[in-house]
Image (cartoon, rainbow, N blue to C red):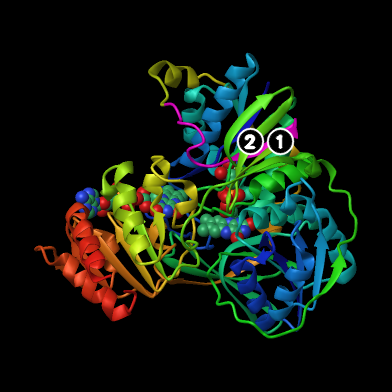
Amino acid sequence: MKVWVFAEATDDKVTTATLELLTKAREIGSEVEAIYSGSGDTAAIAATVGSYGATKLHTMDPGDGLPGQVAAAPIAALVGTDNPDVILFAQTYDGRDALGRLSVRLDKPVLTNGMSLSVDGDSLLFGTAIFGGVVLVDVKLKDAAPALIAIRPKSFAAEESGGSAAEVVPLPAADSGRAAEARVLARHVEEQQGPKLEEATVVVSGGRGIGAAENYEPLVEELAKLLKGAWGASRAIVDAGWVPYALQVGQTGKTVKPKLYIALGISGATQHLVGMKNSDNIVAVNKDGEAPIFSVADLGIVGDVHKVVPALIELLKAKS
Amino acid sequence: MNVAVCVKQIPDPAVPGSLSADHTLDRSGKLILDESDSYGVEMALQLVDAAGGGEVTLISMAPNEEVSGLRTALAMGAAKAILVSDPALAGSDALSTAKVLAKSIERAGDIDLVLAATESSDGYTGTVPAQIAQLLDWPALTFSKHVEIADGKVKVQRQTEAGYDEVEASLPAVVSVTAGVVEPRYPSFKGIMAAKNKPVDKVTASDLGLEASQVGWEGARQEITNVEQAPARQAGEKFEDDGTGAEKLVAFLEQLKVV
Ligand SMILES: Cc1cc2nc3c(=O)[nH]c(=O)nc-3n(C[C@H](O)[C@H](O)[C@@H](O)COP(=O)(O)OP(=O)(O)OC[C@H]3O[C@@H](n4cnc5c(N)ncnc54)[C@H](O)[C@@H]3O)c2cc1C
Ligand SMILES: Cc1cc2nc3c(=O)[nH]c(=O)nc-3n(C[C@H](O)[C@H](O)[C@H](O)COP(=O)(O)OP(=O)(O)OC[C@H]3O[C@@H](n4cnc5c(N)ncnc54)[C@H](O)[C@@H]3O)c2cc1C
């Protein structure tokens, strides 16, 4: 099976989600190639994707166009000549843009929010979870190749194969039509401290139970920093404007899988749980003993975050 | 300026979802306006207001000629709606849905801007806006958390992993908006009364020139082979905080060697 991966990179660093896809691609396919639309250093990216098993890196520089959207036309052209069986995308902003446009160009259905993928005879078996992760669904693709599939980050482990750098080849030139009219005028990078939410060993998240926006820093951020972790949030406090969307964990936010997840004042709605319940260990502090978060917690403290968390912070400070 | 807003009518998310015998989402009960789309409706009303003219047209595909969600959006202030309802559309996937919505936008005619949510609350495939844009060959500004119109162009703040990008495109264009882009208004009593008489253009797939092979089950080209409950995670220990909660936490953290 010939598997392509839509690769993404932040500056010159290939994203973890891409590495997860490449690892999966190696497992299900005999030939793995990557596609990259961006202005990063293609030699550096080719070295990384190569060490995860890609033999070729098809590249284009989107200039100030939206990288996913202007990539669709050239990818469609390449599909026409190279006939891949599967194209994998991460369920990310640019991944979804590329996938949506490509599906129309090829007139192929999309499978999205994937959490598992395997080969069954000569067809692909795609697994996803619905109703906030409570029900698992397996789907068999009936259509002719290529299958267009988007996978939620953190669904697979990323493992190196030790391959040499992928061969860099330019994507064929193709007319993107009016998709190319969307232009990036400026980029705003929000200051980020500490480890990335998706990569941290410890994640501390706050929910509505912390009471007010000004409690986020002294309770959630402070505890996360002491544990050298990242801080996250439930959608309730993102929608309330207490913290930016980038911190949201759950169905419509990030999926995290740290060694330890600490939920402070979070009720544990299914849409939140789907983003964190595969963490190795879960700790919850909630004043309501019946809160659903306790049903997934390895250690639950039924109590007030305003008492428990400051006391915890004091104890941790005293120890260091 | 004329704005079309794609609004999905969905089963109430507060009620636990279930699947029908054919493995599609059970949509037989009452459907409501997807909260995610209330942001698009509000944004559209504000943009038309700021432009000083034009109207907001709702576009929806839903079973059984469902209108309750549309009435909510009409009560907020939209002028009219196109409702595509057709048994041939049952089982439609995201691409088929986008084909239906794109054809409906063409039917509405004279649209400068299409708004949709970044993803719906029930299916959350998250590709429909980009698919609509490609079908129409319009630019798409996706994941927008701020939208403005000036000099025949639309300018948005597009969410990125690192922060946001300022992105611009000429009209007509498709924009997908995130939850919280604006604060949706509550329909007023007057709005609710007025909504009852606003026009809803009810059409079928063939009215839009779509063949059954392009949409619905046939269009989806996939088969659900297994549905099962996810394995539940075991709950661990739970303690009432009697003043020793913090100590118990420290002990647990030490055991995990994170401190
Ligand atoms: C749990 C679940 C998983 C599914 N997975 C897939 C999948 O992997 N691939 C696939 O192709 N289909 C899938 N489907 C089917 C698909 O969700 C819908 O049936 C399809 O009609 C619309 O897709 P969406 O709501 O997910 O689109 P999204 O792309 O999430 O919708 C984005 C926006 O498009 C607009 N929109 C979408 N549908 C309509 C509508 N009917 N009327 C008006 N506006 C609308 C709304 O503004 C909406 O917020 C799934 C359905 C369910 C219930
Ligand atoms: C389509 C859809 C997608 C969604 N996506 C997401 C998502 O990605 N992520 C997400 O998080 N949510 C998501 N949600 C929302 C989700 O359903 C919940 O509404 C949300 O997670 C609730 O956030 P919360 O737990 O902070 O707030 P609440 O549910 O209000 O819970 C607050 C908790 O704090 C506790 N509490 C109050 N005071 C204290 C105190 N002093 N000390 C200790 N505990 C206290 C309360 O007992 C309560 O359990 C989504 C919903 C829908 C419909």
Q: Considering the image in quadrants, where does the N terminus of chain B appear?
A: top right
Other residues around mark 2 within 10 Å, as few (<14) / some (14–19) / many (≥20): many
Q: Describe residue A174's horizontal placement relative to residue B64 as left or right.
A: right
Q: For the point 62% across and 28% down, which residue is it?
A: B148
Q: Is-magenta flag for residue B171?
A: yes
Mark 1 vs ligand 1: CB under 8 Å? no
Q: Quadrant of residue A134?
A: bottom left
Q: Are marks 1 and 2 in contact (CB under 8 Å)?
A: yes
> Which percent across, then down, holds residue B244?
12, 67
A130 lies above or below A57: above
Q: Label for residue B160?
A: none
Label of residue B156 in the image: 2
* Residue A53 position (above or below residue A180): below
In front of the other: A192 or A1: A192
Of A23 and A112, the residue lying toward us: A23
Tell me the residue at 78%/55% (across/down). Answer: A72
Of all chains, the one bearing label 2 is B
The residue beneath circle 1 is B168
Which residue occupies 69% across, 52% down? A97
| Whole-percent x, y for residue B120 in the image | 53, 47
Measuring 79% from the left and 50% from the top, which residue is drawn there? A70
Q: Nearer the viewer, residue A1 or B62?
A: A1
Q: What stretch is highlighted in magenta?
A: B168-185
What chain does badge 1 belong to? B
- Looking at the figure, which quarter contains the C terminus of chain B? bottom left
The three-letter code of the residue at mark 2 reads Val
Q: Residue furthest left?
A: B242
Q: What secondary structure is marked by label 2?
A: strand
Q: Is residue B209 visible?
A: no
Taking the image as shown, residue A28 lies to the left or right of residue A57, namely: left
- Residue A50 position in % (x across, y down): 74, 78
